[in-house]
Image (spheres, rainbow, N blue to C red):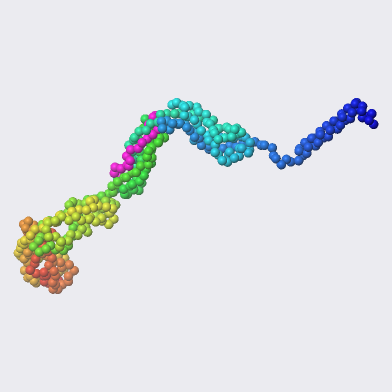
Amino acid sequence: MDNFIGKRWIMKIIALLLALMLYMSVNIEITSTQQQRETSPSPFPSASTDTETVTDVPVSAYYDRDTQVVTGLPQSVTITLEGPTSTLKPTVLQKDFEVYLDLTNLELGTHQVPLQWRNLSERLDVTIEPAVASITIEEKVTEDFPVEVDFINRGLIEEGYEPEKPIVKPNSVKVTGSKELIDRIALVKARVDLEGVNESLEEQSGVTVYDSEGNTLNVEVEPAVVDVSVPITSPNKKVPLRINRQGSLQENLSILQVEAEPKEVTVYGPKGVLDELEYIGGIDLDLSDITESTTIEVNVPVPDGARRVEPEKVNIRVEVEQEEEKTFTNLPIQYIGLSDSLELEMIDPEDGVMDLTVLGAPSVLEGVTSSDMEIYINVTDLAAGEHEVPLEINGPQDVSWNLPERTMKFRLSEIIE
């Protein structure tokens, strides 16, 4: 046995056989493992790729906004992303990336500028549509322009009403844009709608800038909204004032003149109301408080249905003098309202005449004559028979009077044909 083992060639053969057996064993195991992997699902899925398209992605632009105006900037773009799903999905959901144009080193003029992006993983392929923007860089200019008011639907304002000159605050605005646009400005306007308007307006209105052809210009306006006040003139009519005298002057005083300043006021309101208005009443003057010539300020009442009066207050000038008297003798007593079927016979006074004493300021009495004074009775609706009725006096406003009798007796008789 020792001799057998001791032979070197026999040992080499044995070693070769062992090596072949080991190789075949390992190869069979690898092949079996690969077959098992192919037939059995793996708990760790292999890496996959995907594509997503994001629309309406806003575009940022970087340039000197204090001195430059840029036109042609795209508001948004469409971006397509392709790459590993594990990277793509969070990117699309979070949208924390930016698409931008870098114009900081460009001169005035028109340029073709590629759109750039940032905050996107290098593992993603990025496609932007459009990829290039055609932009124009111009000098930025700011100038002041007055604001005019443009009335729209002026023909639809309520009948009889008219707009007066509007008031705009502020009356000028700062307009900023490219020098080419600023040079084209012809009008800067605020608009006010007058449809159905029947009173003064106070409202805010946006400011619009126009060129000479009526086209609106895309410029910045500061402020963009102004306050507009439009006085509206309504139908109006001048009418006199009627002053109601109440109470009596102190003894021995007489009114020389009572006059409103101004004598007429202007009433504003619907045309139908004004057509029926002849005067304004409701102004009371208490004579018992007056001891000398004076001026009193009073409010002017607004008539029913009217909107306002101008002025709202007037002065009433009252002039008084020491009272004197003047007597007119044998003034005839007249009568009114006598039926055609009746005749009137005076009983007391039988002669149908009476003396009348008129009291007033000397300058007033000087102009009063007997023809200015009327003594009469009212027999309207009285039947045949004897009657006694009050005597009535008609004369100038600024005088008073005394009668020896306050009543008159008379007889009404049927006329026999």
Measured from the top left, where is residue 117 in percent x and y?
Answer: 54, 33
Task: For the C terminus, give its image quadrant.
Answer: bottom left
Q: Is residue 259 above or below residue 173?
A: below
Residue 350 vs residue 289, the one in the foreground: 289
Answer with the quarter of the image where residue 373 lies: bottom left
- Left or right, 39 with respect to 245, comes to right
Total numbered badges shown on the rendered structure: 0
Residue 383 seen: yes
Answer with the quarter of the image where residue 170 lies: top left
Answer with the quarter of the image where residue 131 lies: top right
Magenta segment boundaries in residue numbering? 163-182
Q: Residue at x 84, y 33 (%)?
A: 22
Measured from the top left, where is residue 78 in percent x and y?
Answer: 55, 35
Q: Residue at x 8, y 62 (%)?
A: 252
Measured from the top left, where is residue 41 in percent x and y?
Answer: 74, 41
Q: Is residue 238 magenta?
A: no
- Left or right, 52 with respect to 279, comes to right
Measured from the top left, where is residue 68 in percent x and y?
Answer: 42, 30
Q: Residue at x 83, y 34 (%)?
A: 25
Q: Is residue 177 magenta?
A: yes
Q: Is residue 154 above or below residue 278?
A: above
Residue 207 seen: no
Q: Residue at x 61, y 37 (%)?
A: 87
